[in-house]
Image: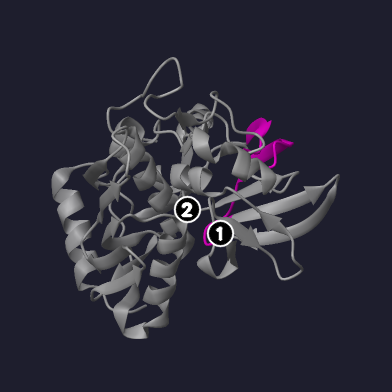
Amino acid sequence: MSKRFIGSRQTTLAGEVVMTGIGVHSGAPVSMVISPADADTGIRFILMKGDDVVADIPADVRAVANATLCTVLGSANGVTVATVEHLLAALRGLCIDNAYIEIDNAEVPIMDGSAAPFVAAIDEVGIRELDAPRKYIKVLKPIRVEDGDCWGELLPHAGFFLDVEIDFDTPLIGRQRLSVELNPGVFRAELSRARTFGFMRDVEKLWACGRALGASLENTVALGADRIINPEGLRYSNEFVRHKALDAIGDLALSGAPLLAAYRSKRGGHRLNTLMLRALFADQSAWTVVQAPRTRDIGRPEAIARVASALLAADRS
């Protein structure tokens, strides 16, 4: 189907995607199969042990068990799956609503530290439109969260707009800000290749805590005292803020449906993104669910305008 798909119908993958790698924190090998799913399934992580299903965990903010360094989802029986944000960003960035993710370990493979390998694998099998209208979560009023010197806010908006700012006390990063209106083309070109990053000064401390055991220059941008350690350098001049925006897309995908909102954050991360969604859903007057009308004029500007207008006017379903 066209990459200009505007979002009136739900989607899933057109075939299975098989991927292998290691967990960036566990260092353990992991195999993963992303499979098509029916309409209204959502995104679900199926934890496997051999041929047995150990847990079925929805990609839902209510399942977040931890948001330190990465986003961890957990089941009622204590089974967890970590580092879900890059894969979720790829699925949301490509407007995929429904998929099963079978995984044989407790962490999504880090691949190259970005969402690009997931995007490439999905593009190989394609995306299939389903005969069911897409549902959106429409933000009705501003919601703001403050967490120390970090803050975030969700505002009403006809699409999905990101305004992300970071500020690190090192000249290698400093203050960076990125504003984008998200669609699959923008995600592919501007965000998907941005890699996770870390500081060499923190490595021993992380190892002592059992973290970053699989981190390497193959999957992480490493910052030394005065230089980028990776010999190839950066993929974008502002790769750091682009990766933070990618993380935000993945974390906000835990809303369970695409957001019609503008998201602004300063010095944010997984914890702030999670707190933001929890604050939104805690206020029943701040959001509603709207359903996209059907249109056959995929990608045409006048069709986009009609869909946006209908979504803005829709009532709670």
Label 2 sits on what residue type?
A: Asp
Element at label 2: loop
Residue 100 visible in rendering: yes
Q: Which mark is residue 97?
A: 2
Residue 217 spot, x, y in % from top left: 53, 24
Marks 2 and 1 sit apart, C-alpha to C-alpha, by 11 Å
The C terminus lies in which quarter of the figure?
A: bottom left
Residue at screen point 45% across, 51% down:
250
Q: Earlier in the sequence, mark 2 or mark 1?
A: 1
Residue 43 to residue 195: above or below: below
- Residue at x-position 31% and y-position 64%: 151
The N terminus is located in which quarter? top left
Residue kind at label 1, given as amino acid type: Ala
Residue in front for this viewpoint, 247 or 128: 247
Q: Residue furthest top?
A: 231
Q: Quadrant of residue 23?
A: top right
Identify the residue shown where x is 32% and y is 38%: 170
Vertical order, 247 against 308 (above or below): above
Mark 2: give few (<14), some (14-19) or many (20+) Cα within 10 Å: many
* Whole-percent x, y for residue 78 in the image: 74, 65
Tell me the quarter of the picture where residue 176 sits.
top left
Q: Which residues are magenta?
A: 17-43
Q: Residue 29: give x, y in percent of width and height.
A: 73, 34
What crowding class fits label 1: few (fewer than 14 Cα within 10 Å), some (14-19), or many (20 or more)?
many
Q: Nearer the viewer, mark 2 or mark 1?
A: 1
Residue that carries the numbered disc 1 in the rendered image: 59
The disc label shown at residue 15, or none: none
Residue 106 shown in magenta: no
